[in-house]
């Protein structure tokens, strides 16, 4: 196990490295993975924890575009009691996601892409796995293509009535993901209204 600078040295030399984030042990293959991990931890602290964005110690967090588990590990670092649902379509990245989060409780992983319709779609693999997507970006070069299954979030999360935090990082495919999540987002809005009304009534009494 190594720290940040030891990991950076090992990765720069072409060797893999494993770093500890709370209860998770993240295996990294390149410096981009380390940079993404560091950004996830810093951004989660600054934008979620530091702003009190989540009002419970045991939130439900949906992580779409999980890659190898960087965001999931950051979420569990600050909210150990959180339930995290992580989606990653690429089978290679998914295998790393499972390995990197196997020490974390209340984490469910899904090896599927998310979009507006169900079916098989072309997934474009980038040399930097965090840049891979079901769509392409101008000026980017993709190393290979693979057909992968896509589901609607509404069809997968039929048992989820409330999402405290929805993170989507799918490199330009965000609109399609949201188009397939109308029902679960509507349930979240309705549940939020009920919670606010209950809190207001309790305060009034």
Image (cartoon, grey):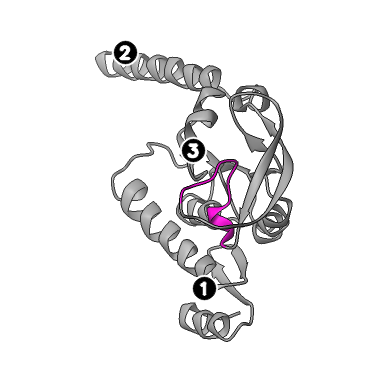
Q: Residue at x 44, y 57 (%)?
A: 40
Percent position of residue 99, x then y: 71, 60
Question: Which residue is tagged 1?
Answer: 31
| Quarter containing the N terminus | bottom right
Name the residue at 41% across, 20% down.
Answer: 192
In which quadrant of the rendered view does residue 119 lie? top right
Question: Is disc 1 surrounded by few (<14), some (14 to 19) or many (20+) residues within 10 Å?
Answer: some
Of pointers 2 and 1, the one earlier in the residue sequence: 1
The disc, 1 or 3, on the residue closer to the chain's N-terminal end is: 1
Residue segment shown in magenta: 128-138
Q: Is residue 188 above or below residue 6?
A: above
Secondary structure beneath disc 1? helix
Q: Residues within 10 Å of mark 3 (few under 14, many from 20)?
A: some
**SS at mark 3 in the image:** loop
Give me the disc on residue 201. 2
Position of the C terminus by quadrant: top left
Which of the 4 image quarters holds residue 70? bottom right
Mark nearer the viewer, 1 or 3: 1
């Amino acid at each position: 196990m190594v720290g940040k600078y030891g990991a950076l040295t090992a990765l720069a030399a072409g060797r893999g490295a494993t770093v500890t984030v709370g209860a998770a042990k993240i295996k990294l293959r390149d410096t981009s993975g380390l940079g993404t991990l560091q950004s996830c931890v810093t951004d989660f602290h600054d934008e979620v924890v530091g702003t009190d964005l989540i009002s419970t110690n045991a939130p439900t967090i949906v992580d779409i575009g999980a890659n190898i588990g960087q965001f999931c590990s950051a979420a569990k670092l600050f909210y150990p009691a959180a339930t995290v649902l992580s989606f990653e379509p690429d089978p290679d990245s998914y295998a790393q996601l499972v390995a990197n989060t196997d020490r974390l409780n209340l984490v469910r992983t899904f090896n599927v892409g998310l979009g507006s319709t169900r079916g098989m779609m072309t997934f474009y693999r980038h040399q930097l796995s965090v840049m891979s997507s079901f769509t392409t970006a101008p000026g980017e070069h993709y190393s290979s293509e693979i057909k992968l299954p896509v589901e609607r979030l509404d069809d997968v999360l039929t048992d989820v009535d409330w999402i405290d935090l929805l993170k989507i990082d799918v490199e330009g495919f965000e609109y399609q993901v949201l188009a397939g999540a109308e029902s679960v987002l509507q349930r979240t809005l309705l549940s939020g209204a009920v919670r606010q009304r209950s809190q207001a009534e309790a305060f009034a009494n």
